[in-house]
């Protein structure tokens, strides 16, 4: 089988970064600043630099305490309470503290031009779950501003660009003590390429796209986490999948299905109607449509289960009673987006459904982004810990930029400790190449139905409302599905830009991680944040909070365990805010969502 | 293929020509009313410093202006660039200038062809 | 609502590099269907070897632009009904960029020009400084704001015939970004920008064809931005500063 | 056939400006040559002038003035676009420039006939 190894091109660099979201791009810039002169930095992305991933899709904004009464302590407390006491407190603290530096860097060095108050200072608004106006934004297209500016900076630097390079495996050294490099498929040619590097950052951005309805970009399919699992790393909080209550529902044949309709629609007074055209939210919560994201998601899901669903199987959002003209001006972007897709948001009803939005779970890392093996670092949505069971709107992009920057700094310094590139375990390399080529040895079949089956299993059994029996049934189906995937073929015609081959690889990653989500879901016997067990609806004992840890053993089986949360900074029931601190600084706090939280994501 | 300098030259010459051309057309409308002949034209222009400068300026401007314009078009249509394009630009400008000057001299100062 | 009404003939460009041809597929037509959905359907169910590119599917990443019936468009937010006037749908890779395969282009030249236009923020302060106060109603801020939401989709770049003919031309998107920075009170590289956009491939090559502004899916106006640059460069030239 | 991405008013204005520029540049040497006939061969010049009495030729002259007018007003429009404060009426201005050109050239035609 030497031919397999020979067919794989070899390439060397010093610092290798996977992904060009907020985490990857910031890491590249910081590594460039801190690494000794002459260090080679390479950025490898599954899509195009800056044009793939979810940071680009951020609408609402960026959480950071910038004074005016708000403090890092308050931001931290909101994050920990929002995460239902599961966050790794040191990570959450560093996130809140460094966000202050990062936002100045974004404005002053990278060139982001955020919206201003009348006095010229940065405008901040409040998202649900926040006790201060904290979210910095650029209109409701904040992500475009952040990523476009970062992209320009990176493109103008002497950083090696490996675009449309899909990472498929981490390859350790022979003794497994360190990471040697990363195996890629150069998507444009279809060839394999192994890149050795002294340090590697994984910033592939998670992405719960194994659900029937999901918001993240199409290139995100849990590749990083599935690679990390195969490398034997520990992952945490894998049951924590955040659902956004109002994803567009337009049928299975369109990619628009699942994309976000902004939360501000409900905040502004939009009605949710079931299939019988009846408002139902007050049956579930006294705040009606203005209840928090998880509550609304669960209510919609419950309503759908009662067969009160709209034609496509969801519910309706209706704005027309607020006056179509008014809706058209207040929600210009959303109305236009809906109109482009054939829906009249201003005067008609639009079908919506809860949609998988963010993945709180991820690789266990320290506050310097170091993962459990020498040479590997993890940042952004791929890293677990900072958000616990629930991510606050606005903390996602703060997390990826803060920890991406830290990873760049740390790699830039660590590189000096590693004088040499490490040689890979060729056996692993060869196995991984063979595994990726597997589908070419079977007859070609349509993969989309298989993907849809996966998405239905996850949605039905490991979705918004979960039970032990349901998840176990789901696991069984997942097992069968994995077998089916492994026997599904892709046409041999050409490997160059072969999207269908990549669809297969996507499926492989998604199946791997779906198993872990289901198992972790079974392991958590209470309901926290995004994880709701109908058979264990209580939050459980806060003082003895635990998080779930999953790990693949040498033999390939999955090991689940629970680990106690270390309350290193504050314990449940306590606060680090001064005694006389007001509970909230927001003038008209949620659930009375204001227009300022219009595009909360 | 246009740098700020060529661009300015083209605009400045255009601005210069605008009144000249309008003036010329005005005169023509007036002149052609009774039909046109060599003698009539020459009667007006022969020996006139004013008309010499009027048309002279026009010829200089249009040579520069059209040469730059054609250069742009040639580059965009054929991709021609570098030396060859430069030759073309200068060639166009000079030919237009020579042809134009000859014509003006013919109607203003030069004695009519020996007959 | 969910069942296909009829099928639609769709001609799709197939080929590697510059060589290729149109191939026709029968695709079921649905009520809510974008051009990207049509392309995806072909890859999912008819010909798995079809190559194309997309990421966000909601008009934010600018990776899905193609020529649809001869016009450049973002395909993820182009409803099929909007373009199927005569019942034909013809989909080709975006113009003015090298084709990798089928509908996927190589966008590198577009971004190389972006950098060449100095369309990259020139920092005037650091993370240790406070953020600059900029009044939201300031005239310059408004000019900077006008073009800031560009998603670098290269639709304008494909619409422009100057780009097609003039290999050096930086193109509408890069120039618009340069203009945004030129009006950004915090940018320390105004002169650098002016020089970069006044050279051989600079703003002065724009003939105000207006295709950029006509097709920009984000409803921006690069033509106006370029006019702004021309004016600024003219001023600088008259003052002897260029 | 005009390709689809070119079917909008400002592109057509551009096309008209470019075509008129080329045609004018082609006509100019001819014009100069005819004038210089006055220098070398007055008889031939007068002959030529008589030739211009023909209706077809009159029409052609009208065209020429039209080209000139289109090019000038179009050019002025462009310079206004580039140097004067921006207005959102670019399409209307382009149409206006063309209308003005038609007016001028028709006036000219009426005069010469
Ligand atoms: C619609 C939407 C709206 C959001 N709004 C907000 C908001 O308002 N505020 C907020 O704080 N957060 C928001 N989030 C969450 C936020 O976007 C993410 O948490 C954050 O941007 C993640 O950044 P990242 O760098 O980790 O990953 P991403 O930005 O997702 O980048 C991942 C990168 O990895 C690449 N990649 C993936 N797989 C591979 C592979 N195998 N090989 C190589 N490269 C690979 C991808 O192509 C991409 O470049 C939103 C998310 C979505 C989907
Ligand atoms: C009779 C003489 C003229 C000739 C032969 C002529 C020729 C040309 C040519 C060939 C071009 C290039 C067109 C292009 O790039 O598409 C051009 C461009 C131009 N002309 Fe003229 N022109 C003449 C008179 C004028 C006048 C009087 C004006 C102005 C009022 C004018 C204004 C312009 C402008 C502004 C351009 C630049 C167009 C652009 O950049 O797209 N021209 N001219
Ligand atoms: S200016 Fe408009 S068309 Fe051009 S790249 Fe930006 S968003 Fe796309
Ligand atoms: S289409 Fe091209 S020519 Fe200028 S106005 Fe736009 S850049
Ligand atoms: S897929 Fe992102 S803009 Fe169309």
Image: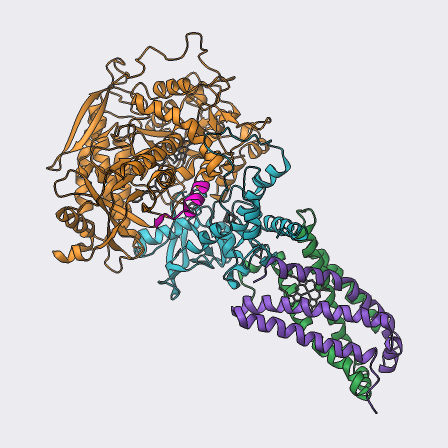
Chain colours: A orange, B purple, C cyan, D green
In the rendered view, tell whether residue C203 sits above or below residue B52. Answer: above
**A480 relative position to C46: left or right:** left
Q: Is residue A489 above or below residue A374?
A: below
Q: Is residue A233 above or below residue B2?
A: above
In the image: residue C196, left or right of residue A548: right
Residue at x 51%, y 62% (from the top left corner) = C164
- For residue D1, what is the image quadrant? bottom right
Screen quadrant of the N terminus of chain A: bottom left
Q: Residue furthest bottom?
A: B115
Residue C29 visible in the current orientation: no
Q: Do we see residue B95 in this rendering?
A: yes
Front residue of B39 and A598? B39
> Measuring 33% from the left and 50% from the top, which residue is drawn there?
A164
Q: Which percent across, then down, holds residue C86?
A: 50, 58
Nearer-the-camera pick, A536 or A493: A493
**Rendered image quadrant of residue A205:** top left
Residue C30, position as x, y percentages in the image: 41, 47
Picture quadrant of ligand 1? top left
Residue C47 relative to residue C99: left or right: left
Furthest residue in direction left, as rendered: A555
Q: Is residue A539 above or below residue C16?
A: above
Q: Is residue A333 left or right of residue D45?
A: left
> Which quadrant would the C terminus of chain A be assigned to in this image?
top left
Determine if the magenta segment contains residue A160: yes
Q: Could you tell me residue C208's position as x and y percent? A: 61, 56
Q: Is A23 colored magenta in this rendering?
A: no
Q: Position of residue A202 (x, y in %)?
A: 28, 39
Write the start and end of the magenta stretch as one range: A148-162
Q: Nearer the viewer, residue D18 or A211?
A: D18
Residue visible at 14% across and 46% down in the picture = A425
- Please count the marks in the image: 0
């Amino acid at each position: 089988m030497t031919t397999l190894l020979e067919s794989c091109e070899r390439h060397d660099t010093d610092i290798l970064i996977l992904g060009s979201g907020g985490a990857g791009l910031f890491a590249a810039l910081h590594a460039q600043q801190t690494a000794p002169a002459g260090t080679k930095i390479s950025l490898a992305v599954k899509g195009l630099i800056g044009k793939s991933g979810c940071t680009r899709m951020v609408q609402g904004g960026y959480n950071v305490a910038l004074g005016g009464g708000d403090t890092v302590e308050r931001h931290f407390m909101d994050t920990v309470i929002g995460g239902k006491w599961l966050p790794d407190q040191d990570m959450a603290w560093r996130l809140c503290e460094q966000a202050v530096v990062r936002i100045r860097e974004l404005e002053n060095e990278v060139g982001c031009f955020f919206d201003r108050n009348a006095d010229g200072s940065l405008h901040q608004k409040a998202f649900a779950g926040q006790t201060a106006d904290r979210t910095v934004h650029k209109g409701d297209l904040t992500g475009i501003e952040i990523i476009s500016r970062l992209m320009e900076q990176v493109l103008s630097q002497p950083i090696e660009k490996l675009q449309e390079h899909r990472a498929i495996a981490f390859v350790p050294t022979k003794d497994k003590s360190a990471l040697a490099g990363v195996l890629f498929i150069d998507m444009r040619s279809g060839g394999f390429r192994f890149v050795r590097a002294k340090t590697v950052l994984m910033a592939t951005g998670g992405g719960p796209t194994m659900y029937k309805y999901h918001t993240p970009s199409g290139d995100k399919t849990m590749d990083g986490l599935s690679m990390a699992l195969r490398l034997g790393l520990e992952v945490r909080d894998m049951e924590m999948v955040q659902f956004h209550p109002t994803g567009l529902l337009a049928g299975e044949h369109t990619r628009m299905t699942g994309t976000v309709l902004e939360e501000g629609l409900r905040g502004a007074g939009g009605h949710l109607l079931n299939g019988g055209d009846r408002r139902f939210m007050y049956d579930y919560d006294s705040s009606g449509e203005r209840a928090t994201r998880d509550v609304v998601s669960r209510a919609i899901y419950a309503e759908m289960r009662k067969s009160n669903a709209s034609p496509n199987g969801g519910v309706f959002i209706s704005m027309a009673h607020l006056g179509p003209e008014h809706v058209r001006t207040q929600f210009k972007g959303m109305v236009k987006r809906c109109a482009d897709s054939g829906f009249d948001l201003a005067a008609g009803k639009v079908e919506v459904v809860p949609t998988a939005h963010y993945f709180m779970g991820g690789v266990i890392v320290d506050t310097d982004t170091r993962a459990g093996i020498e040479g590997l670092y993890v940042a952004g949505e791929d890293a677990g810990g900072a958000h616990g069971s629930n991510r606050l709107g606005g903390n996602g992009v703060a997390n990826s930029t803060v920890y991406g920057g830290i990873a760049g700094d740390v790699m830039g310094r660590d590189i000096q400790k590693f004088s040499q590139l490490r040689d890979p375990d060729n056996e692993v390399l060869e196995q991984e190449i063979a595994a990726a080529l597997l589908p070419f040895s079977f007859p070609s079949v349509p993969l989309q139905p298989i993907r849809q089956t996966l998405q239905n299993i996850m949605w039905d059994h490991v979705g918004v409302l979960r039970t032990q029996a349901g998840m176990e049934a789901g696991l069984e189906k997942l097992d069968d599905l994995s077998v089916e995937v492994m026997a599904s073929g892709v046409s041999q015609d050409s490997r160059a830009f072969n999207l269908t081959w990549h669809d297969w690889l996507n499926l492989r990653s998604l199946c791997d991680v779906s198993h872990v989500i289901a198992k972790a879901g079974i392991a958590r016997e209470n309901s926290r944040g995004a994880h709701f067990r109908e058979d264990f609806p209580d939050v459980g004992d806060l003082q003895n909070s635990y998080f779930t840890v999953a790990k693949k053993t040498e033999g390939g089986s999955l090991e689940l365990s629970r680990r106690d949360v270390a309350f290193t900074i504050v314990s449940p029931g306590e606060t680090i805010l001064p005694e006389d601190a007001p509970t909230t600084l927001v003038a008209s706090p949620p659930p009375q969502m204001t227009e300022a939280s219009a595009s909360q994501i | 293929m246009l740098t700020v300098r060529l661009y300015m030259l083209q605009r400045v010459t255009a601005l210069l020509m605008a009144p000249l051309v309008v003036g010329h057309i005005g005169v023509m409308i007036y002149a052609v009313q009774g039909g046109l002949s060599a003698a009539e034209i020459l009667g007006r222009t022969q020996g006139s410093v004013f008309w010499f400068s009027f048309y002279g300026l026009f010829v200089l401007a249009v040579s520069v202006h059209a040469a730059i314009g054609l250069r742009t078009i040639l580059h965009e249509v054929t991709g021609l660039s570098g030396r060859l394009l430069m030759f073309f630009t200068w060639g166009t400008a000079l030919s237009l200038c020579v042809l134009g000057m000859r014509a003006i001299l013919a109607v203003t100062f030069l004695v009519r062809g020996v007959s | 609502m969910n069942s296909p009404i009829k099928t639609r003939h769709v001609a799709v460009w197939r080929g590697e590099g510059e060589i290729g041809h149109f191939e026709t597929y029968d695709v079921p037509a649905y009520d809510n269907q974008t051009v990207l959905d049509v392309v995806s359907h072909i890859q999912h169910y008819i010909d798995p070897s079809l190559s194309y590119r997309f990421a966000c599917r909601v008009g934010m990443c600018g990776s899905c632009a193609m020529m649809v019936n001869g016009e450049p468009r973002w395909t993820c937010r182009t409803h099929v009904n909007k373009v199927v006037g005569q019942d034909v749908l013809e989909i080709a890779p975006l113009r003015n960029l090298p084709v990798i395969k089928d509908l996927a282009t190589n966008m590198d030249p577009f971004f190389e020009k972006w950098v060449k236009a100095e369309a990259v923020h020139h920092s005037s302060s650091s993370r240790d400084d406070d953020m600059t106060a900029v009044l939201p109603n300031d005239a310059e801020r408004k000019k900077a704001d006008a073009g800031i939401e560009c998603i670098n989709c290269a639709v304008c770049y494909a619409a422009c015939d100057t780009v097609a003919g003039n290999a050096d031309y930086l193109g509408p998107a890069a120039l618009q970004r340069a203009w945004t920075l030129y009006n950004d009170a915090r940018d320390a590289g105004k002169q650098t920008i002016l020089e970069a956009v006044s050279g051989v491939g600079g703003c002065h090559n724009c003939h105000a064809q207006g295709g950029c502004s006509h097709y920009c899916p984000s409803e921006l106006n690069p033509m106006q931005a370029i006019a702004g640059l021309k004016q600024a460069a003219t001023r600088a030239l008259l003052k002897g500063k260029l | 056939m005009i390709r689809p991405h070119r079917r909008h008013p400002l592109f057509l204005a551009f096309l008209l400006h470019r075509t008129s520029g080329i045609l004018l540049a082609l006509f100019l040497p001819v014009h100069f040559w005819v004038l210089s006939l006055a220098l070398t061969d007055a008889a031939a010049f007068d002959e030529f002038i008589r030739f211009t009495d023909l209706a077809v030729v009159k029409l052609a002259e009208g065209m020429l003035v039209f080209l000139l007018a289109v090019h000038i007003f179009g050019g002025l429009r462009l310079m206004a676009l580039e140097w004067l404060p921006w207005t959102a009426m670019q399409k209307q201005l382009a149409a206006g420039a063309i209308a003005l050109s038609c007016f001028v050239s028709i006036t000219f035609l009426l005069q010469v006939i």
